[in-house]
């Protein structure tokens, strides 16, 4: 796929909330796909531990890893200020050309700049299990994945280098270069 091409990410949150996100493809690697979600419509703003991490007009650089049980976002405020690294625990994405499909497994991992990694939304996963929206084996897989990410973050081995390398500024520069 060509740089800047739009992809549609079908993101199912059980039981039936489906959102489709349109993002621009920045890097189409075999082991990682980098996309840019521009001017996200967050109203009200998304807060983690009281801090605004996404707001109306925010850009997010997303890293999708074929075969893995998570993706990663580099979060920013509308003015471009980097706010942290966010991992969604989800089913490995099915990637077919410009249409990608995945299911959210509720858990998230958050790492603020200079902060300690945090597990988010355990209560939401517990609710989903109780309502039988997610089976116990899938929930166990989600918890294992989140635990692995937290352990790697505490050891200084997460996020992976590609997430540090592909900043918002680099993505914007690549798009500009490609359109010139």
Image: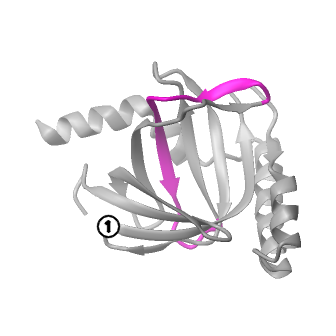
Residue 155 can be seen in this image: no
> Measuring 43% from the left and 69% from the top, which residue is drawn there?
100
> Measuring 37% from the left and 50% from the top, which residue is drawn there?
23
> In the depicted view, which residue is nearer to us: 155 or 146?
146
Magenta region? 49-69
> Measuring 85% from the left and 54% from the top, which residue is drawn there?
122
Residue 5 occupies quadrant: bottom left
Horizontal and vertical percent for residue 75?
56, 35
- Which quarter shows the N terminus? bottom left
Left/right of residue 74 with respect to residue 28 in the rendered view: right
Say whether residue 61 is magenta. yes
Position above or below: 174 against 64: above
- Which quarter shows the C terminus? top left
Horizontal and vertical percent for residue 69?
65, 67
Residue bearing the label numbered 1: 98
Question: How is this picture coloured?
Answer: one colour
> Measuring 49% from the left and 29% from the top, which residue is drawn there?
56
Left/right of residue 57 with respect to residue 139 in the rendered view: left
Position above or below: 153 against 98: above
Position above or below: 60 against 144: above
Left/right of residue 73 with respect to residue 111 in the rendered view: left
Residue 84 can be seen in this image: yes
Q: Callout 1: helix, strand or loop?
A: loop
Horizontal and vertical percent for residue 30?
42, 68
């Amino acid at each position: 796929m060509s740089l800047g091409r739009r992809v549609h990410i079908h993101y199912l949150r059980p039981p039936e909330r489906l959102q489709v996100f349109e993002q621009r493809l920045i890097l189409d690697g075999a082991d990682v796909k980098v996309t840019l979600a521009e001017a996200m419509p967050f109203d009200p703003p998304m807060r983690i531990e009281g801090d605004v991490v996404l707001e109306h007009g925010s850009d997010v650089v997303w890293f999708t890893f074929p075969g893995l049980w998570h993706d990663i976002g580099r979060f920013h405020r509308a003015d471009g200020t980097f706010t942290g690294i966010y991992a969604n625990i989800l089913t490995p994405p099915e990637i077919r050309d410009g249409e990608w499909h995945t299911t959210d497994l509720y858990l998230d991992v958050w790492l603020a700049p200079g902060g300690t990694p945090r597990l988010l939304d355990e209560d939401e996963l517990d609710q989903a299990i109780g309502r039988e929206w997610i089976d116990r084996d899938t929930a166990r897989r989600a918890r294992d994945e989140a635990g692995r990410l937290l352990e790697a973050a505490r050891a200084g081995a997460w996020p992976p280098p590609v997430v540090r390398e592909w900043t918002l500024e680099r993505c914007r520069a690549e798009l500009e270069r490609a359109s010139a």
